């Protein structure tokens, strides 16, 4: 329907290698995602009637119009920094067969729209093979990590987090996405309330063609709180455009904490 405020920005239908620690879920998964343009004045979920993903062999998955949580990985996520929503459903039933996948969105206003992409299973498996062959070396490279206490409480731009990238050991070029939140475990990590993240998809949309490419460090663009535990993880993908992505590798979370604030001296 022409003029509907509900407009798809992009979609994902791709494999997920779920390498988080302490999870009973299998590592080989897949996900469907649809992101929307902002809908000023109206929360996007109020405009959604249904979202359905379809693929080869009659495969069909319905999204749920609910808040996405770590316990129920099916629903919407709100990015307060850019005032937009995306819906995602993670499915622990193995990698996707190669082929064409479509996500259809029906609006409460009667509108219908869809996007389609083709999944390349070979590209997905190549990246996972390189990652698993170097996994221990990659995990040992994260800094900060090991629940260490930082020497001070970083202000905006003062904390650098770094890691090793696959290309340094003869692996393929890849794209790296960093996410930081308060928490002492993967379960406490709240995707709905990130402290900061390195949104390479938006960077690419704004003209940075190499956003995230072989990125081995970030300067965190937010000040941190004193006496607080933080967790971050770095996702590895084969593209910096949602609709071109075949695989997302979720590396294990890393943890650190900030020291207590130093009280001001009397008389100062």
Image (cartoon, rainbow, N blue to C red):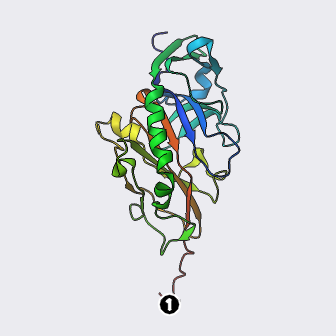
Q: Quadrant of residue 44?
A: top right
User: Eyeballing the image, is 34 above or below 160?
Assistant: above
Give the image location of residue 204, x and y in percent: 34, 36
Left-right relation of 83 to 207: right
Identify which residue, 220 or 212, lies in the foreground.
212
Q: Residue furthest front?
A: 133
What's the residue at 49%, 39% (across, down)?
Answer: 128
Inspect this view and state whether residue 145 appears: yes
Q: Check disc 1 and report the residue beneath it.
A: 267
Q: Quadrant of residue 86?
A: top right
Q: Residue furthest bottom?
A: 267
Identify which residue, 13 or 83, lies in the foreground.
13
Q: Quadrant of residue 182?
A: bottom right
Left-right relation of 67 to 223: right
User: Eyeballing the image, is 166 above or below 37?
Assistant: below
Give the image location of residue 32, x and y in percent: 56, 27
Inspect this view and state whether residue 235 appears: no
Find numbered disc 1 in the image and state the secondary structure of the residue it sits on.
loop
Give the image location of residue 12, x and y in percent: 49, 28
What's the residue at 45%, 60% (across, down)?
Answer: 141
Left-right relation of 114 to 70: left
| Number of other residues with Cα within 10 Å of mark 1, as a class: few under 14, some 14 to 19, many 20 or more | few
Identify which residue, 86 or 175, lies in the foreground.
175
Give the image location of residue 25, x and y in percent: 68, 41
């Amino acid at each position: 329907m022409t003029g509907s405020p509900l407009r798809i920005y992009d979609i994902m239908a791709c494999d997920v290698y779920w390498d988080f620690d302490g999870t009973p879920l299998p590592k080989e998964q897949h996900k469907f995602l649809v992101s929307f343009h902002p809908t000023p004045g109206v929360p996007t979920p109020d405009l959604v009637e249904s979202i359905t993903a379809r693929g080869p062999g009659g495969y069909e998955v319905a999204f749920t119009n609910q808040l996405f949580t770590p316990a129920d990985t099916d629903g919407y996520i709100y990015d307060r920094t850019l005032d937009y929503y995306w819906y995602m459903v993670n499915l622990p039933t193995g990698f996707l067969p190669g082929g064409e996948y479509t996500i259809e969105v029906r609006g409460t206003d009667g509108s219908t729209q869809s996007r389609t992409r083709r999944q390349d299973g070979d590209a997905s498996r190549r990246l996972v093979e390189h990652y698993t062959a170097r996994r221990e070396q990659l995990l040992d490279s994260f800094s900060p990590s090991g629940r260490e206490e930082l020497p001070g409480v970083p202000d905006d731009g003062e904390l650098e987090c770094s890691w090793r990238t696959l290309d340094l050991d003869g692996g393929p070029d890849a794209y790296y996405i960093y996410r930081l939140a308060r928490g002492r475990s993967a379960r406490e990590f709240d995707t709905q309330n990130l402290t900061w993240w390195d949104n390479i998809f938006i960077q690419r949309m704004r003209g940075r063609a190499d956003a995230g490419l072989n990125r081995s460090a970030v300067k965190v663009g937010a000040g941190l709180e004193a006496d607080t535990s933080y967790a971050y993880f770095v996702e590895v993908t084969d593209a910096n455009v949602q609709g071109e992505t075949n695989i997302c590798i979720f590396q294990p979370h890393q943890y650190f904490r900030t020291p207590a604030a130093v009280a001001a001296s009397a008389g100062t």
